[in-house]
Amino acid sequence: MKVCGVIAEYNPFHNGHAYHIEESKKKTGADAVVCVMSGNFVQRGVPALFDKWTRAEMALKNGVDLVVELPTYYATASAEFFAQGGIGLLDSMGVVDVLSFGAKTEDLDTLKRIANILYLEPEEYKDLLKAELKKGFSYPAARSTALKVFTKKEFDSKYITEILLDANNILAVEYLKALMYNNSLIQPQIILRKGEDYNSVNVVDGMCSSTAIRKMIQEENYEILPEVMPQKSFEILNKQILSGRHPMDLREF
């Protein structure tokens, strides 16, 4: 039996997530999918649109076989600790063979190379990073420049910049780094991300981001939801709304 692991928020579960699960099974040949999912609070510390039980039900009715909660400590943390928590849980199960994650590139070798540098932190790279930080640059900007200079003999600097500008790629690098940190036997599998970026509010060919869906729901614009969510997910969402359990919003606090 082959088991595929995924790490997600499903806030809420939409067509892009369904595509990811379907493609993960196809590409890995997995018999089962285990998802480590954020609980009632997600990254940046905001409350999830719906409680963890509702979002877990969406996942279970759309191809996931088991949902395990990612503790809030990791779920609300930076990409680095979010990845460490998720990978740590999947690795500790002892049954997960493959980690499937979305990215804007299928260049796994380059992502692995970047992750390896960030994991090992060679002295030359650390010196470059310190020099950039002393100039007053933010950590992400300093890290990007240090990586470009350190790998200039291997990669075109513009290519590294493009990779590190995308949030999905950055999270992918953190997943790979966490696999190294855990000395894990889990093998990585990239699923090329389709549709809009995670913070886009556009809808293209039935695909949109969770951000777009949350915006529609908060504005009570439900007309497009059946087009961008799997039927079972929309039915669960609609049932919640009709029962009076309105979606959670940071403004409620």
Image: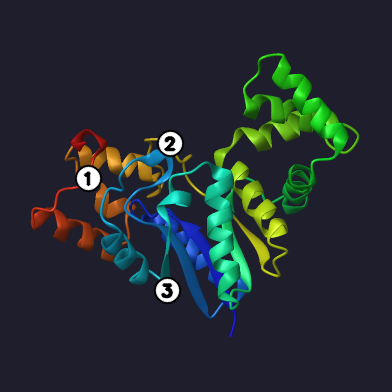
- Which element type, helix, strand or loop, lies under badge 3? strand
As measured in the structure, the alpha-carbon distance from the residue carrying label 2 to the one carrying label 3 is 27 Å
Q: Amino acid at mark 3?
A: Leu
Q: Is 151 displayed left or right of 3 in the figure?
A: right
The residue beneath circle 1 is: 248
Percent position of residue 131, x then y: 78, 20
Label 2, label 1: how far apart the Cα atoms are: 18 Å
- Gap between marks 3 and 1 measured at Cα: 24 Å
- Residue in front for this viewpoint, 64 or 140: 140
Mark 2 sits on what residue? 199
Location of residue 1 with respect to 201 vertically, above or below? below
Asked where in the image residue 204 lies, by quadrant, the reply is top left
Q: Is residue 228 above or below residue 186?
A: above
Name the front one of labels 2 and 3: 3
Q: Which residue is mark 3?
A: 66
- Can you tell which quarter of the image residue 150 is in? top right
Residue occupying the point 22% across, 33% down: 251
Q: Residues within 10 Å of mark 1 (few under 14, many from 20)?
A: some
First in sequence: mark 2 or mark 3? Answer: 3
The C terminus, quarter of image: top left
Residue 48: % across, % down: 31, 48
